[in-house]
């Protein structure tokens, strides 16, 4: 099950049409744009959900990676579950991203994000297919801003970590379980997958990948650690793998959220526009959100990624303001202040974005 996309031509008109149709069919009939749930019987149910967004991103320093109008990680999904007994449950999910970037291509793409089936019992859960990686269990601690994020954790940085399954992993078997410890909880997950057919460039191809994570949660606090490896052919210096270790934490309450992580990676960064080699990297990123009313919150983030000899680096802070009309619909603006990013980085230069997002499903950490 490889990473796939389906393109729809005719430029941005199709994306705008998708936004309008989605809003009319999903939001107008319901008060707050709730997800659509279908209960077949007391043991079987399905849900349709996701979020739809429209954002305009302008790079003040005329970066070649200026986005313009874009869909900002919009996605839709169908999930379902069937209870076989009180302790045994079958479940599954299919999720596609809606991708449109005006300044980079002229298609609206539907991109496979998740596609798995699973079974859960007292002994834990097993999922098979394209699943979330254990690495993302920790990387998600800093995945809370709207526009400028996810560069120093190594979960989604294209084309290395993303293709190697550090965010979502193809053809995988994932096991996860949890243990209650009085008033706290311990979570564990492990994965093995096959990324064959996915190439970083003309020289480097990915094979099997595997990893594990452990997290500890107490009330609103979480801390965790993960390590993930992807076997690869074609690496320089006779290396045979891409790997990374990440440690992070988060605190979340009704009015305040703080989260961050630190990553050390080997061969997990592509020095774009330079030697074309994969290099080692270190990254730190974090964010702070403060809600000062039911309708408004401000947030800020810091992101820094460095490589050996500073062939490629990213460093910026971002500041944002969000206005939510309810728990489903919000508008936001965000500013990225460049602190010394190399010119070949996707995040070079100061930039500003404004956007509208409505959540078909519940994504409470964004509020």
Image (spheres, rainbow, N blue to C red):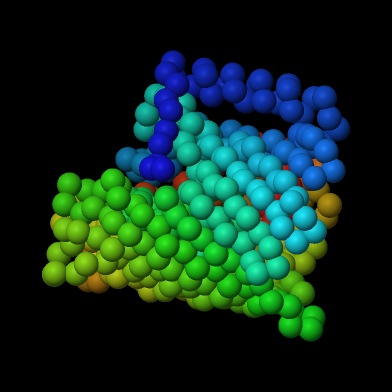
Residue at 53% x, 44% y is: 115
Asked whether, in this view, residue 235 is left or right of residue 333, the answer is left
Q: Position of residue 15 (x, y in %)?
A: 54, 24
Q: Residue furthest left?
A: 237
Q: How many marks are shown on the rendered structure?
A: 0
In this rendering, would 112 be left or right of 282? right
Identify the residue at image location x=55%, y=55%. 127
Residue 276, image quadrant: bottom left
> Where does the image place residue 12, in percent across and percent down from the top left?
49, 22
Residue 138 horizontal/vertical position (percent):
54, 67
Q: Is residue 156 above or below residue 53?
A: below
Residue lying at the far bottom of the rendered structure: 182
Quadrant of the drawing holding the N terminus = top left
Decide: is 255 above or below 249: above
Give x and y (percent) for residue 155. Answer: 44, 59
Q: Residue at x 69, y 36 (%)?
A: 48
Q: Nearer the viewer, residue 80 or 198?
A: 80
From the viewer's perspective, tell me whether residue 160 is left or right of residue 277.
right
Instruction: Please name whichever residue, 179 or 361, is drawn nearer the observer in this view of the structure.
Output: 179
Residue 336 as seen in the image, left or right of residue 295: left
Query: Could you tell me if residue 79 is visible in this image?
Result: yes
Residue 322 in view here: no
Q: Residue furthest front?
A: 85
The one nearer the camera, 62 or 102, is: 102
Q: Residue at left 32%, top 40%?
A: 64
Image height check: is 271 above or below 92? below
């Amino acid at each position: 099950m490889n990473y796939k996309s389906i393109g729809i031509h005719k430029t941005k008109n199709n994306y705008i049409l998708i936004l309008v149709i989605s809003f009319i069919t999903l939001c107008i009939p319901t008060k707050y744009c709730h997800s659509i749930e279908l209960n077949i019987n007391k043991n079987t149910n399905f849900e349709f959900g996701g979020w739809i967004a429209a954002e305009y991103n302008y790079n003040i320093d005329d970066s070649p990676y200026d986005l313009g109008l874009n869909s900002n990680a919009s996605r839709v999904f169908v999930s379902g579950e069937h209870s076989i007994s009180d302790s045994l449950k079958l479940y599954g999910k299919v999720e596609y991203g809606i991708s449109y970037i005006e300044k980079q291509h002229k298609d609206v793409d539907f991109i496979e994000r998740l596609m798995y089936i699973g079974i859960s019992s007292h002994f834990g859960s097993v999922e098979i297919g394209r699943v979330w990686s254990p690495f993302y269990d920790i990387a998600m601690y800093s995945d809370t801003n709207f526009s400028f994020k996810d560069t120093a954790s190594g979960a989604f940085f294209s084309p290395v970590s993303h293709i190697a399954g550090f965010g979502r992993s193809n053809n995988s078997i994932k096991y996860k379980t949890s243990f209650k410890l009085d008033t706290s909880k311990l979570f564990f997950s492990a994965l093995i997958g096959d990324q064959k057919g996915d190439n970083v460039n003309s020289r480097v191809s990915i094979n099997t990948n595997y990893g594990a994570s452990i997290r500890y949660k107490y009330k609103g606090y979480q801390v965790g650690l993960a390590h993930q490896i992807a076997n690869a052919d074609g690496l320089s210096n006779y290396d045979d793998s891409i790997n990374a270790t990440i440690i992070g934490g988060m605190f979340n309450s009704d009015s305040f959220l703080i989260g961050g992580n630190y990553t050390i990676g080997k061969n997990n960064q592509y020095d774009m526009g330079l030697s074309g080699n994969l290099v080692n990297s270190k990254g730190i990123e974090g964010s702070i959100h403060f809600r000062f009313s039911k309708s408004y919150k401000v947030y800020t983030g810091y992101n820094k990624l460095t490589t050996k000899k500073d062939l490629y680096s990213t460093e910026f802070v971002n500041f944002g303001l969000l206005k939510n009309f309810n728990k489903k619909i919000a508008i936001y603006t965000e500013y990225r202040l460049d602190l010394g990013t190399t010119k070949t980085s996707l995040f070079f230069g100061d930039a500003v974005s404004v956007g509208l997002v409505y959540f078909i499903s519940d994504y409470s950490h964004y509020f």
